[in-house]
Image (tube, rainbow, N blue to C red):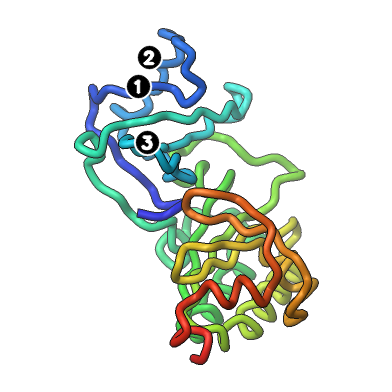
């Protein structure tokens, strides 16, 4: 289970809000969300908690409110990876479909994995409106070798130039450390340049050399 994975919960499960607030109306809304078969998204976890932290964003008509929930592991029915573009091509709006499919093919050819998250993913998952004319597309790209970084960055740059909107998202290493692909593209391969790292349990600044050093040595040499 990793950040951006989709978590489907057992209807009627017990949940608490991350903020600790008691809101019966919101609790009922989330219960209805789960009963409708909609997933929540795996968030960055709390290191000292025995529960799983999940999040969801409500549709535009409800103000795109972001909600963080804590649930017990036994209430998680199943976990699936972020949406694969090749599997949802018919649901992607015209104008986004061709550049995103080309990106997915290139990433696959690099032996990396590409997933979709954010507002476009929520629209496809729920059938509700989330996007507007200013909305970006968000992707998560999982790599297995440092040699993939230049190839993946080039593919993302090409897709960003072809899309009619912004392309945001992250490149994630096997240890779960993820960085903004745009930030990485601006500084790669400068060893001492700093970048914000989103780890499974923390967020911190790191130099590229330290980031690479934190990855398994076999991966760094691959």
Q: Residues within 10 Å of mark 2 (few under 14, many from 20)?
A: few
Kindly check if marks 3 and 1 are in contact, taking CB atoms under 8 A apart as contact: no
Kindly check if marks 1 and 2 are in contact, taking CB atoms under 8 A apart as contact: yes
**Residue position for label 1:** 32
Give x and y (percent) for residue 54: 42, 37
Disc number for residue 49: 3
Farthest-out residue, bottom = 221
SS for tag 3? loop
Disc number for residue 28: 2
Say above or below: 65 vs 156. Answer: above
User: How far apart are the alpha carbons under marks 3 and 1?
Assistant: 26 Å
Quadrant housing the N terminus: bottom left
Of the numbered discs 3 and 1, the one sitting upstream in the chain is 1
Q: Nearer the viewer, mark 3 or mark 2?
A: 3
Q: Residues within 10 Å of mark 1 (few under 14, many from 20)?
A: some
SS for tag 2? helix
Compare residues 118 and 44 and report the one nearer the observer.
44
């Amino acid at each position: 289970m990793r950040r951006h994975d989709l978590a489907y919960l057992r209807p009627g499960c017990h949940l608490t809000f991350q903020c600790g607030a008691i809101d019966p109306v919101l609790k009922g809304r989330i219960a209805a969300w789960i009963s409708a078969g909609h997933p929540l998204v795996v968030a960055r976890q709390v290191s000292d908690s025995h529960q799983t932290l999940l999040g969801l964003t409500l549709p535009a008509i409800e103000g795109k409110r972001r909600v963080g929930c804590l649930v017990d592991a036994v209430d998680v029915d199943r976990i699936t990876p972020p949406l694969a573009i090749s599997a949802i091509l018919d649901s992607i709006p015209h104008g986004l479909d061709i550049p995103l499919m080309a990106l997915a093919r290139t990433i696959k050819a690099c032996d990396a994995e590409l997933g979709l998250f954010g507002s476009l993913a929520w629209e496809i998952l729920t059938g509700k409106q989330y996007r507007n004319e200013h909305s970006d597309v968000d992707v998560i790209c999982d790599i297995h070798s440092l040699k993939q970084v230049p190839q993946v960055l080039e593919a993302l740059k090409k897709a960003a130039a072809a899309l009619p909107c912004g392309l945001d998202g992250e490149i994630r290493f096997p240890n779960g450390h993820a960085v903004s692909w745009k930030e990485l593209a601006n500084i790669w391969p400068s060893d001492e340049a700093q970048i914000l790292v989103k780890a499974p349990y923390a967020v911190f600044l790191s130099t590229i050399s330290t980031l690479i050093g934190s990855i398994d040595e076999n991966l760094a040499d691959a």
